[in-house]
Amino acid sequence: MVTFLAGGTGTPKLLDGADRVFDSAETTVVANTGDDVELGGHLVCPDVDTVLFNEGGVLDTETWWGVDGDTTATHEELHRLADAAGLDSGPRYLNDEAQTAGRDIARWRRFSGVAEFMRIGDRDRAVHVTRTSLLDEGHSLTEATRTLAAAFDLEIGLLPMSDDPVATIVHTSEGPMHFQEFWVHRRAEPEVLDVEFRGSETAEPTPAVLDALDDPVVVGPSNPVTSLGPMLAMDAFADALASTRVVAVSPFVEDEVFSGPAADLMAGVGRDPSTAGVADAYPFADAFVLDADDGTDLDRPVVRTDTEIGGPDDAERVARAAKRALEAVD
């Protein structure tokens, strides 16, 4: 049995070859939900869906977002209507009162669907409509995710990190903004001053997540701040990691990050943007997988390999290194 913690694209890429190393039927993935948004009334769970679509064999692996070959007729019509009506096309974050009205899971993450700022494909949208409708019927996010996983015939177990809302809010030189606005719309351009995980003080991991964290855990090469940070901000989640076997794959090679805004975000929260900074952020990790060119000296066991993941063979290599690291702390 093994559990992967997933956010962004780093861990899903690792999962591309992990099934050659770990039995899929005994693998659970716990996905970050701090990046979720309610867009036009539909709950979008980007990190859950990247795993859902990838493991279901339909992910667009050019963008690592959405369904391969999807059409975008609804998205385009939303923009045509907004343009024809003279409406602003930027992210339309709803007002404070609207943020806490309606379904609890969407708190602090609610955007208008007018000229939606995230490109949502038509088949992709059907997933969000189904998920949101299941929530409105009274199902939990965990239950809705299991239903969708069955529809995509997943062999692995897929769990959201919590059934409670946690919103990643990036405080920038231009004011606070939801992570998706910062990353998708603003392309991570504003200077990061801090990152807040709103709602984490009352959110709890589900019993299913806590059960999964009893098994050995692999933290993939995901962003330590916005992919793992929302999970670690829940005290019970962090406590569970401290009492189980954990191996982490660094998304850095010394002070060079493979992709994404991890370096700026780590600097913004006062951590060194490097492998050493990742180790400081993960005191619960018993061992690390580092790139062969990463000479960082850590106070924990290290397995080195080429950690760049360009396809399933690369992913298998890194997954085997993670398995060796787990065995080193058995």
Image (cartoon, helix red, strand yellow):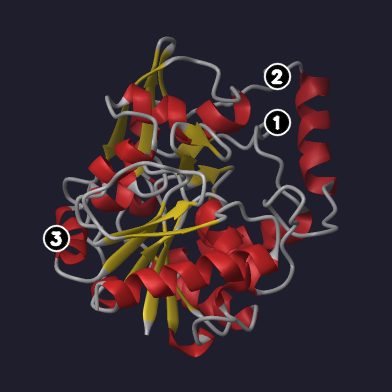
Numbered circle sitting on residue 87: 2
Q: CA distance from mark 2 to mark 3?
A: 47 Å
- Judged left or right of residue 313, residue 49 is left
- Find residue 226 and report its image quarter: top left
Kind of residue indicated by mark 1 = Ala
For label 3, the residue is 239
Residue that appears at 28% across and 60% down: 301
Callouts 2 and 3 close, C-beta under 8 Å: no
Kind of residue indicated by mark 3 = Asp
Residue 250: image x %, image y %? 43, 49
**Mark earlier in primary sequence (2, 1):** 2
Residue 80 seen in the figure? yes
For label 1, the residue is 115
**Mark earlier in primary sequence (3, 1):** 1
**Alpha-carbon neighbours of circle 1 within 10 Å: few (<14), some, or many (≥20)?**
many
Q: Quarter holding the C terminus?
A: bottom left
Residue 154: image x %, image y %? 59, 81
